[in-house]
Amino acid sequence: MIRSSIAVKVRGLTKKFGDFTAVDNIDLNIKKGEIFGFLGPNGAGKSTTIKMLCGLLLPTAGEGSVGGWDIMKESEEIKKTIGYMSQKFSLYDDLTVEENIHFFSGIYGVATSRKKERLEWALEMAELQDRRNALTKTLPGGFKQRLALGCALLHEPPIIFLDEPTSGVDPISRRNFWNLINEMSKAGTTIFVTTHYMDEADYCNRLALIYRGRIIAEGTPNELKQKYMTRYVLEMEVDKVVEAMEVMLKKGMEAAIFGSLLHVTVDNIEKTVPQIKKVLKESDITLTRIERIMPSLEDVFVTLIETT
Amino acid sequence: MKLIRIKAVAKKELIQIWRDPLSLAMAFLMPVMLLFIFGYAITLDVNNIRTVIYDMDNSSLSRELVAEFRESGYFRVIENIYAQKEIDKYIDSGKAIAAISIPQNFSKKIRKGENTELQVIVDGSDSNTATIALGYISAITGKYSQKVDGRNIKIAIDPRIRVWYNPELKSKNFIIPGLIAVIMAVIAALLTSLTFAREWERGTMEQLISTPVKTYELIAGKLLPYFLIGFIDVAMSVMLAKILFGVPLKGSPFLLMILSSIFIFGGLTMGILISIIARSQLVASQVAMIATFLPAFLLSGFMFAISNMPRPLQIITHFIPAKYFVTILKGIFLKGSPFKLLLIETTVLSVFGLLVFVLANNKFKKRIV
């Protein structure tokens, strides 16, 4: 059960391993029903943070609560409130799909009357109805991931922590996965999810960017884009896209191909656009459209890290 | 406490054992194998000593003596030889362990009522067998001389070898019950020493400790299937002892199984404690092996009498759970001891098991690192 409308609230959360500070004095505020994305490169401190919030790792310093329970003193109460899916697959390889589900539903103390229903729900969610008797080790990565998610949600926890749930999963599975997360959020579940895929950040209600143990930015995806992106991204439609990119690069501009379109990052629109038009004309490339677009979060993150 | 959780852990553990041939072999084959190996290897009995006879007298009396050797069951006469130097050949090549030569005047001297001598050569490279063989020889000749004496021929064959000899000693009767205790001490700890370490090594512990399962539920759930295995192991060992080794079971099999369960509980819990501390399957299994086998083998009184040990060692034996189990097994097997005579041992083993359980419960932290 959750004792307050704030699902996660921590101040000054710190974890040191010897001399190394993995998580450095971070604050978090996550409302009930929110999808909170925790972004950062590998080794930034995402997993350490999530483990502290789940009561798996004792913080070196800090205070706060998860689901209203104290993170320092009531970690066993927290464990009744949450579902946790670790970064590494941690179900039993030598058990079948159904045996794994049975085990965790026993461990989470799912009521006998609900067991069958939850089993079917998990199988359906993971699309494993036809493979319920398959040994878990024989499943492809995406199915394993969803089975792990299913097992962590058998007891219908109000807060769930997902550590890199989509790493190593194919794009279609990833999209299905995020649809599922969205549905749960709509049903009132709070979701704390870490990822290093920047394109997934747009699925989140709110984001925090963590780098070297510190939170360097926080806000909704749009806030982050507007607040931190001081450079502009121009999208162009040209007839010879590869040649156009080569020309841009030669002129020292940042250019990248997105499908049939060309993206160029610039500091100043007024000055650069005429310049681009001129260069393209000289190279005999026809420009049919040029406009400023919203930068992606990846652009934001790269910019932020460069300035940190 | 939620029984549903204990049940879930126990069931999962059982499936895992069932699917792992190595675990299965360790659970059911190893105790039987150990009992075979040690049961046959550790023995104080010497039977079928390969013997050659050099009968220079070749009389009815000398043949009667040879027959005594044959019929004793301890000697197997493999050859009658007719020259002294052949003895060396047989002994040196190891074809024979003992050679007995009967002097020419053997029957003559006996009839005259004089003492006579046998020449006995025994291969001394296995001193244990040699000593025992000599003991048998002196006993058989002693018996023979009495028999001859009974016919009112007043003589004695002087057995010049004096060695300790216990005519009816069947050492297996003493060794096997103690051996069961030693084997169960090792097996019990070894079985569970892998349980927690395996979860840490495979990464499944991380998921497990994120759930509301309580430590004692986890320990109890993991203990249950192994308890069942330990129980079956004891039953198998007791049956093998009876059927294969012919050890008589004088006491109550029911009492034996109940008291064995108490010991198994302690042993399994010990393995869990080791697994919790070691976190690595390799380290845990080695520690479990050393921590149980050596004390159980050397200090339990299973083979080496505690009363013969120096005082400090004697005190240490009080802390070896296997010692109490050896007493229980020997008591029930050989003396048919009733429960009231084994009350102290039972109490000590129960306290030990509970203590280790509490220790394991406190030692396990539902956290990483």
Image: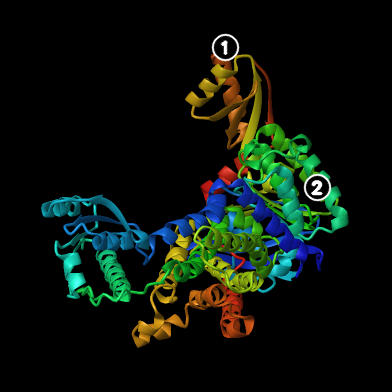
Q: To which residue does mark 1 refer?
A: A284
Judge by depth and name the residue closer to the eye, A259 or A14: A14
| Dots 2, 1 in contact, CB < 8 A | no
- In this view of the protein, can residue B149 be seen by the observer? yes
Q: Secondary structure at mark 2?
A: helix
Q: Amino acid at mark 2?
A: Leu
Q: Against A83, is A301 above or below?
A: above
Query: From this viewpoint, which residue is outermost toward the left?
Result: B85
Q: Secondary structure at mark 1?
A: loop
Label 2 vs label 1, nearer the camera = 2
> Which sits earlier in the primary sequence, circle 2 or circle 1?
2
Q: Residues within 10 Å of mark 1 (few under 14, many from 20)?
A: few
Residue B209 picture location, percent across and down = 64, 61
Residue situated furthest bottom in the rendering: B311
- Distance, label 2 to label 1, CA atoms, is 63 Å
In the visual, does B87 lie left or right of A3? left
**Mark 2 — residue?**
A119
Say which quarter of the image contains residue A298.
top right
Query: Which residue lies at the image location 22% right of the left edge and 73% below the top edge?
Result: B159
The correct choice, above or below, for B79 with respect to A254 in the image is below
Q: Is residue A186 left or right of residue A17?
A: right
Camera sees residue A44: no
**What's the chain of the residue with tag 2?**
A
Q: Residue at x 61, y 68 (%)?
A: A12
Looking at the rendered image, the quarter that the N terminus of chain A falls into is bottom right
Q: Position of residue A307 (x, y in %)?
A: 53, 49
Looking at the picture, tell me which residue is in the foreground, A42 or B302: B302
Q: How far across and down, in percent of the image, does residue A199 sit? A: 66, 39
Q: Residue furthest top?
A: A284
Q: Is residue A160 left or right of residue B97?
A: right
Of residue A303 and residue B100, the one placed in the foreground of this image is B100
